Amino acid sequence: MEWYELLIIGIVLFTLFLILYAGYRIALSIYNPVRHSLMETRIRETEKTPDLMKAYDEWEKIPYQIETTNGYELKAYYLPVEKHIEACKECFVIIAHGYTYTHHGGIKYASIFKELGFNVILYDERYHGESGGKNCSLGYYEEQDLQDIITDTYTRFGPDIYLGTYGESMGGATVILEQAHDTRLQFVIADCSFSDLTDLVTYLVKRKAHLPKWPFVGLANFFFKLATKTDFKSISPVKAIAHAKVPMLLLHGSIDEFIPPIHSQKLFDACSSEKQLYISTVPAKHAESYLMNRIEYTEIVKNFVLKTMLDSKK
């Protein structure tokens, strides 16, 4: 074999290795992302909303652990409603935070529900904060974990509680996925959720890595499946929401470049239950709709919840 033939073979093999490695690195960045510590998220939230972090420090918080059916523990926090607020003592909301974050991301939403007289449960999702789990599945196992939290909540506080779920980003996808298999909920709210993981990964691979869908998304899916035992196509909130039975509120920032607002539009179009869509009326990036227009955002959420409660009594 001539030297130039060996050189060509070497170049081809090296190119194939680079392609495989790129697919692996994409998958690794998805299921083993760099996570923010509790201290980091506390600092971030203090910078964004110092008044809410001050209030959070004053709220009564009861920490506890939940053993999941997947074999690890989740760290959760029960925030009982203040006695001086006109309360719905049996009203609860479970709030799921976003990708790479901690339960601190749910404080801003907890403040809305505290004003409504709700009890609030915050928690660290698997592989985040102080919870267990060896990787992040972007909603597949997180959905199962949320079911465990809902079951635990009914066990702790009684079978007659009024319960809804609220999620941001990955947490939004989680609450949408979960409701398709659960008849115990009264409402679901999702802020800046993705509609389909394959579509999101394809978009991010093109936008961030400047790589084409083929072969990189397929390779990333292969390595993702090796690590998590599930695949991208199994994580599709837009399919889950087509089976919705409870009122759904979808919210999204108008200039979100991480998960564009078209994702919430697709979710809204596919939703089979009573639904409402809010795209921020002021420029808001990913998970910033509340921060950019707190008054309007709070009013949207409160009106939705109050209407849902009123309709449930008819």
Image (cartoon, grey):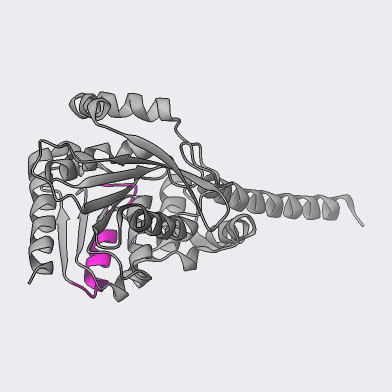
Name the quadrant of the N terminus: bottom right
Q: How many marks?
A: 0
Tell me if 293 is positioned left or right of 230 in this view: left
- What range is drawn magenta here? 255-273
Residue toward you, 67 or 260: 67
Residue name at image x 49 percent, y 60 percent = 213
Q: Quick one: which residue is furthest to the right in this view?
A: 1
Tell me if 249 is positioned left or right of 166 in this view: left
Does the segment drawn in magenta span residue 264?
yes
Name the quadrant of the C terminus: bottom left
Residue toward you, 284 or 180: 180
> Is residue 101 something that shows in the picture?
no
Residue toward you, 253 or 86: 86
Residue name at image x 50 percent, y 63 percent = 232
Residue 203 lies in what quarter of the image? bottom left
Residue name at image x 73 percent, y 55 percent = 12
Residue 154 lies in what quarter of the image? bottom left
- Counting from the top left corner in percent of width and height, residue 221 is at 56, 60
- Counting from the top left corner in percent of width and height, residue 26 is at 55, 49
Does the segment drawn in magenta span residue 153?
no
- Counting from the top left corner in percent of width and height, residue 31 is at 54, 49
> Is residue 298 something that shows in the picture?
yes
- Counting from the top left corner in percent of width and height, residue 292 is at 16, 37
Tell me if 110 is positioned left or right of 193 in this view: left
Answer above or below: position of 7 versus 178: above
